[in-house]
Amino acid sequence: MTADLTTLDLEEAGAVLAAESARFASFGWMRGTSGNLSVVLARDPLRLAVTASGHDKGELTPADVVLVDGNGAAVHEGKPSAEAELHARVAALTGAGAVVHVHTVASVALGHRHPGGIVFKDIEMLKGVGQPAHDVEVTLPVIANSQDMKVLGDRLEAAREPRMPAVVVAGHGLYVWGDTPRQARHHTEVVEWLLELELTRR
Ligand SMILES: [Zn+2]
């Protein structure tokens, strides 16, 4: 958590999230109105700005954001996605300042193929998630999907690999986090790159 993030007000956070959403939407990672992004505005009590539900993620404005508490419930007004609860859980659990949730083809395909987790080894790109490129094996956890965010949060907490700032939800998509929206974006792009590489293997 960097000091500058705590100074973001809700509209500034909305502008940051709208820009990040437009980028991910341009990659085809937020098709339809799928996926959501969040940034932590306060720690005690926990407050997050989360993208509003039901909007095209390529067309968000700074106003398309909802302030939620540690349970993912709206603090004042607006309709957060049900998945806001999992964003709050990830922020509380990992100390992350920003969380990205996208429905990518590679994460869904590989979640089916590797229900026990996806192992990466000897790949230079692992440096992008803070790992040495060689002589280390890192597992990206895969958890079963649920419509109950408490159940999903419990699975995420149990499966979490501290060296990998991401979890695949089988049949659903990807959660990735970082200290700031920019770091969460970099982690998302690196993890998705690793997944796309794995997808090319037979
Ligand atoms: Zn989702």
Image: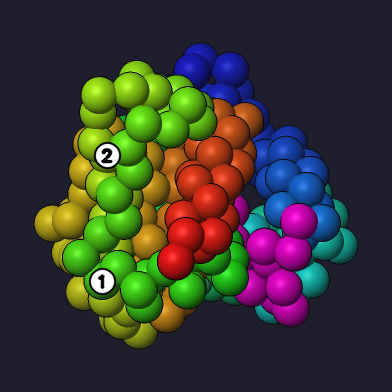
Label 1 SS: loop
Name the residue that disc number 2 marks: 138
Label 2 SS: strand
Q: How many marks?
A: 2
Return the residue nearer the eye: 167 or 71. Answer: 167
| Residue 21 % position (x, y) | 73, 53
Query: Relative to 194, does residue 25 appear above or below in the rendering?
Result: below
Q: Is residue 159 left or right of residue 175?
A: left
The answer to whether the beta carbon of the residue marked 2 is less than 8 Å from any atom of ligand 1 is no
- Residue at 53% over, 51% down: 197
Q: What residue occupies the far top of the structure in this picture?
A: 3
- Residue at 27% over, 39% down: 138
| Residue 158 % position (x, y) | 13, 57
Residue 4 on the magenta segment: no
Q: What residue occupies the far front of the structure in this picture?
A: 202
Instruction: Specify start and end residues of the magenta stretch as a single range.
Output: 27-37
| Residue 16 % position (x, y) | 72, 39
Name the residue that disc number 1 marks: 115
| Residue 123 % position (x, y) | 43, 33
Q: Tell me which corner region of the image, top left, top right, bottom left or bottom right, holds residue 12.
A: top right
- Residue at 24% over, 36% down: 137
One can see residue 119 in this view:
yes
- Number of the label disc, if any, that sits on residue 195: none
